[in-house]
Amino acid sequence: MNVAELRGKDEAALAKELHELLKAQFSLRMQVATQQLNNTAQLKKVRRDIARVKTVINSKDGQQ
């Protein structure tokens, strides 16, 4: 996920993206807990994507 792509989206699309990422993070955490996740780097990637989306949302709120 690219920051430039995120900045091009409106607030509703960013909120939807954030919701989907949070659901994915929950799913990955459950897979880790049940030892079904082989690639644990996915969890780190999702966490960073969530941070990117939140940063863009906060920067858009600050500009208005």
Image (cartoon, rainbow, N blue to C red):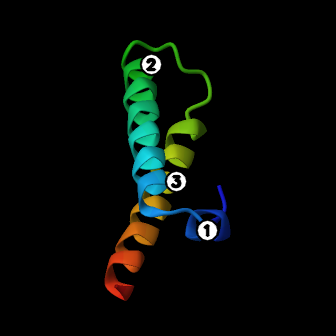
Q: Which mark is residue 8?
A: 1
Q: Which mark is residue 49?
A: 3
| Amino acid type at image mark 1 | Gly
Do the residues bearing badges 1 and 3 touch, measured as CB atoms within 8 Å? no
Image depth: mark 2 or mark 1 in front: 1
Q: Nearer the viewer, residue 27 or 43?
A: 27
* Quadrant of the image occupied by residue 26: top left
Q: Position of residue 38 (x, y in %)?
A: 60, 22
Q: Position of residue 34 (x, y in %)?
A: 40, 12
| Amino acid type at image mark 3 | Asp
Name the residue at 46% across, 14% down: 35
* Quadrant of the image occupied by residue 55: bottom left
| Amino acid type at image mark 2 | Gln
From the image, tell me which residue sits under label 2.
31
**Does residue 51 appear left or right of residue 39 in this picture?**
left
Q: Secondary structure at mark 2?
A: helix
Image depth: mark 1 or mark 3 in front: 1
